[in-house]
Image (spheres, rainbow, N blue to C red):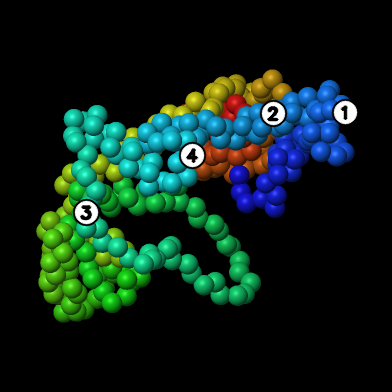
């Protein structure tokens, strides 16, 4: 659910479930005395709205899932660090490893840099697109093998918000430029860019945009836990789809389910790997067969190597 102008139950019920609260005059205490039936109806309706909202968004199930994953209380699910700590500890214990105690002398900063925001240039643009990366931060953690036990060291600069220190950024610098490098014991040494690149490449280290280096010879515990969650998410997402198969009439290019016809407007021929498909009430799409399908308007349309078509319809 995105930011809402009002989080009152009445407003949310009307917007998402077409259910409004029961109206009454005066106070609830007065309503209880004067009209007990309406008082009961009022409370029933509140429960109905909450049930309808949970059926739509499954917040209770999500809260339970996060709490159980992180071995935390339900009211702690909004603190991602607690979920991660609990999940990591549970994973380590399952591997007969005693989780380490907290660092007694942690590095503390007054504040931390957030995500980098580009300042847009005002004007009229054509052919714009919006790119959204799936689970960006967890994907970065897994790709760079970020973890406490895989941490090697970091580049120290006067600008703690410098995010141009990744491998490709270093390769563009003068090899004679120098940086201060800090290891796990917090000892510091001056190294040239050339020496840093040799250190990273020879030891197969991963280096983040802000210059923190991690080992890659073994997966970090955090990466393992996140990978397991991704696999479970894939299985759960698949369970949300009910697979249906349709026979295509070669004469009419129409294939049916119980309610709507689906029209195959043009086939792939020769090296042409696109066909146009209209779903239900006229939605028309150009589908790249080489990509294996697409998802839209509650339908997952899959394309087989033999030009067969599978329609998977979302079950809610």
Tell me which residue sits at (59%, 29%) in the image: 314
Between marks 1 and 2 in the image, the one whose residue lies nearer the viewer: 1
Of pointers 1 and 4, the one earlier in the residue sequence: 1
Residue 2 visible from this viewpoint: yes
Within-10-Å neighbours for mark 4: few <14, some 14–19, many 20+: few
The vertical placement of 183 against 34, above or below, is below
Of pointers 3 and 1, the one earlier in the residue sequence: 1
* Residue 261 numbered tag: none
The vertical placement of 296 against 143, above or below, is above
* Between 279 and 10, the one nearer to me in the picture: 10
Discs 3, 1 touching: Cβ within 8 Å:
no
Tell me which residue sits at (22%, 68%) in the image: 155
Secondary structure at numbered mark 3: loop
Discs 3, 4 touching: Cβ within 8 Å:
no
Give the Cα distance between marks 3 and 4: 27 Å
Give the Cα distance between marks 3 and 2: 48 Å
* Residue 47 numbered tag: 2
Q: Quadrant of residue 65?
A: top left
Residue beneath disc 3: 104
Q: Is residue 183 left or right of residue 223?
A: left
Percent coordinates x, y for residue 143 in the rendering: 30, 50
Q: Is residue 215 left or right of residue 296?
A: left
Percent coordinates x, y for residue 270 in the rendering: 49, 40
Between marks 3 and 1 in the image, the one whose residue lies nearer the viewer: 1
Residue beneath disc 4: 75
Within-10-Å neighbours for mark 1: few <14, some 14–19, many 20+: few
Discs 3, 2 touching: Cβ within 8 Å:
no
Tell me which residue sits at (32%, 75%) in the image: 159
Residue beneath disc 1: 34
Tell me which residue sits at (26%, 61%) in the image: 107
Give the Cα distance between marks 1 and 4: 37 Å
Within-10-Å neighbours for mark 2: few <14, some 14–19, many 20+: few
């Amino acid at each position: 659910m995105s930011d809402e102008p009002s989080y009152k139950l009445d407003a949310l019920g009307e917007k998402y479930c077409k259910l409004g609260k029961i109206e009454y005059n005066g106070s609830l205490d007065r309503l209880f005395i004067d009209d007990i039936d309406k008082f009961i109806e009022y409370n029933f309706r509140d429960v109905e709205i909450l049930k309808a909202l949970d059926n739509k968004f499954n917040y209770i199930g999500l809260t339970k899932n996060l709490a159980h994953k992180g071995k935390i209380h339900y009211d702690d699910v909004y603190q991602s660090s607690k979920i991660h700590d609990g999940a990591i500890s549970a994973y380590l214990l399952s591997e007969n490893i005693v989780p380490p105690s907290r660092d007694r002398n942690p590095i503390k900063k007054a504040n931390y840099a957030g995500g980098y925001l580009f300042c847009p240039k005002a004007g009229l643009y054509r052919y714009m697109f919006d790119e959204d990366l799936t689970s960006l931060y967890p994907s970065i953690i897994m790709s760079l093998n970020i973890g406490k036990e895989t941490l090697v060291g970091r580049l120290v600069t006067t600008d703690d918000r410098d995010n141009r220190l990744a491998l490709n950024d270093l390769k563009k610098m003068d090899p004679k430029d120098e940086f201060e490098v800090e290891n796990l014991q917090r000892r510091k040494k001056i190294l040239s860019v050339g020496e840093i690149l040799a250190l990273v490449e020879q030891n197969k280290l991963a280096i983040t945009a802000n210059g923190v280096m991690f080992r890659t010879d073994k997966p970090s515990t955090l990466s393992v836990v996140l990978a397991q969650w991704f696999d479970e998410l894939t299985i759960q997402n698949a369970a949300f789809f009910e697979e249906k198969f349709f026979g295509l009439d070669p004469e009419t290019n129409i294939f049916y389910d119980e309610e709507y016809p689906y029209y195959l407007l043009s086939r792939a021929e020769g090296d042409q790997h696109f066909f146009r498909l209209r779903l239900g009430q006229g939605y028309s799409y150009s589908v790249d067969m080489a990509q294996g399908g697409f998802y839209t308007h509650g339908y997952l349309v899959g394309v087989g190597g033999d030009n067969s078509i599978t329609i998977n319809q979302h079950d809610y």
